[in-house]
Image (tube, rainbow, N blue to C red):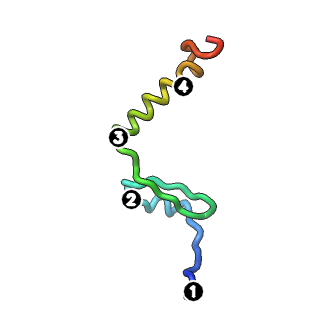
Amino acid sequence: MTQPAFRLATYEDLFDLPDNLIGEILHGQLITQPRPAPRHALAASVIGDEFVSPYQRGKGGPGG
């Protein structure tokens, strides 16, 4: 049985994704994932701020 021809993903393919998916193109292949839930995105932002602030904003990090 023959394999279907491999088609490289395009930038347009990213725009054609449904709103509930995010995507990226890696080595010509479209990779998709479900969009994070709002609560998850907020939690990730808050945690990231806690780790970044001391080092980027001089709030007690190295040398501060």
Identify the residue at image location x=44%, y=35%: 44
Q: Secondary structure at mark 3?
A: helix
Dots 3, 1 in contact, CB < 8 A:
no
Q: Is residue 56 above or below residue 18?
A: above
Q: Earlier in the sequence, mark 4 or mark 2?
A: 2
Which residue corresponds to mark 1? 2
Disc 1 marks which amino acid?
Thr
Q: How packed is label 3: few (under 14 Cα within 10 Å), some, or many (20 or more)?
A: few
Identify the residue at image location x=53%, y=62%: 30
Q: Earlier in the sequence, mark 3 or mark 1?
A: 1
Disc 4 marks which amino acid?
Val
Q: How packed is label 1: few (under 14 Cα within 10 Å), some, or many (20 or more)?
A: few
Q: Earlier in the sequence, mark 4 or mark 3?
A: 3
Of all residues, the one furthest to the front in this rendering is 1
Q: CA distance from mark 1 to mark 4?
A: 51 Å
Q: Earlier in the sequence, mark 1 or mark 4?
A: 1
Q: Earlier in the sequence, mark 1 or mark 2?
A: 1
Which residue corresponds to mark 4? 52
Identify the residue at image location x=38%, y=59%: 18
Identify the residue at image location x=37%, y=54%: 20
Tell me the quadrant of the picture where the N terminus can be found: bottom right
Which residue corresponds to mark 3? 38
Which residue corresponds to mark 2? 18
Disc 3 marks which amino acid?
Pro
